[in-house]
Image (cartoon, rainbow, N blue to C red):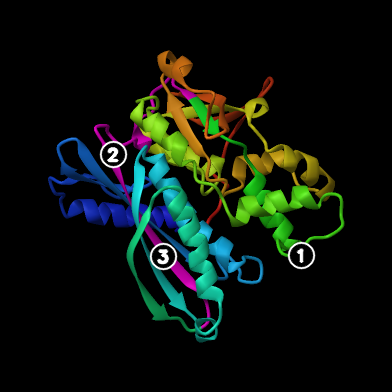
Amino acid sequence: MNEFEFIARIRAQAESRGSRSDLVRGIGDDAAVLKQFAGRETVITTDLLVEGVDFNRDTSPPRLLGHKALAVSLSDIAAMGARPRWALCSIGVPPQLWDSSFLDEFYEGLFSLADRYDVKLIGGDVSRAAEKFVVDSIVLGECENQPPVFRSGAKVGDRLFVTGALGAASAGLRLLERGARINKATKDHEWPSIEALLLRQLAPEPRVGWGLVLGQEHLTTAMIDLSDGLSSDLHHLCKESGVGAVVRSASLPVDPLVTELCGRRALDPLMLALHGGEDFELLFTVAPENAKRLPRKVDGIGITEIGEITSKGIRVSEGARVWKLKPEGWKHF
């Protein structure tokens, strides 16, 4: 049983116990949705980061970790087409960190990102942890006078788009595993490029602006954020929508830094773009008649059309060659 099979089992148990009139969407999307009152809905998401699994203290400076803890939840809110409003943060702290500067720096990073999007920290919890630092981030957002965007709205013939560039976060992780560190600059002429890739892993930028535009302008039929990797997250979207997809490999916006650095390090840029997780870009579908309405950029970030929605099967096309795209992104178990 992998984590997604486990989630499906818990989802079935939750749904078997009935629903409530104020629950719009429960388990199965980037966030849950509650009906507040006419014309306004509340969107809620939570993300857990565990030391030794999701990050390592020797590679993640506390300020960047605070940024990332909030960023991953902001990305979920963006994937719903909602505006982030409030945050809660609970932490489990090993004794050796309690009397250090770690927590001050952690919250500096969290507050710095929160201020950029006018998100208010309104609560949380703190407990002692035995050895590893643990953080649970909860973010609440709002959809005002617009419906949230779900994973389940894609239709056959819709065009498939992605924001930004792919593969950089996964490349950054590979560099960390090979000994690169953000606070240890070298005289290597490649250092600026290496540092940029490390930051894509350690301090991702949630596409809040794009989420708001796509939601408020009713431009997208379905959306998901790329946390587990394009191959896995596309499967999630297609499963919820009951459709398939074709991805054109030549159209994938592989980050130029990935192409520049990874070929010389025996890393395949295409595989990093397809399966590497934590890019936190938005993958979304658009009805053909709405494609011309899409802005070219939001907050300086562009989009790329990478394929289309089909009736069944998830495949990659590379010229005349077509192959099945398996979900080979991040797995906890």
CA gap between label 2 and label 3 equals: 23 Å
Q: Is residue 139 magenta?
A: yes
Question: Does 173 sit above or below residue 164?
Answer: below
Classify mark 3: helix, strand or loop.
Answer: strand
Q: Residues within 10 Å of mark 2 (few under 14, many from 20)?
A: many
Task: Please tell me which residue is depicted at 52% across the width and 58% down the height of the picture.
Answer: 67
| Quadrant of the rendered image containing residue 17 | bottom left
Q: Nearer the viewer, residue 325 or 257?
A: 257
Is residue 277 something one can see in this rendering? yes
Q: Mark 2 or mark 1: which comes first in sequence?
A: 2
298 left or right of 169? Answer: left
Q: Which residue is mark 3?
A: 136
Classify mark 1: helix, strand or loop.
Answer: loop
317 left or right of 217? Answer: right
Q: Which residue is mark 1?
A: 184
Q: Nearer the viewer, residue 19 or 83?
A: 83
Q: Give the x, y percent position of residue 237.
A: 42, 37
Q: Residues within 10 Å of mark 1 (few under 14, many from 20)?
A: few
In this view, the mark in front (1 or 3): 1
287 left or right of 41? Answer: right
Classify mark 2: helix, strand or loop.
Answer: strand
Magenta residues, start to end: 131-159
Is residue 332 something one can see in this rendering? no
Q: Mark 1 or mark 3: which comes first in sequence?
A: 3
Question: Does 81 sit above or below residue 198?
Answer: above
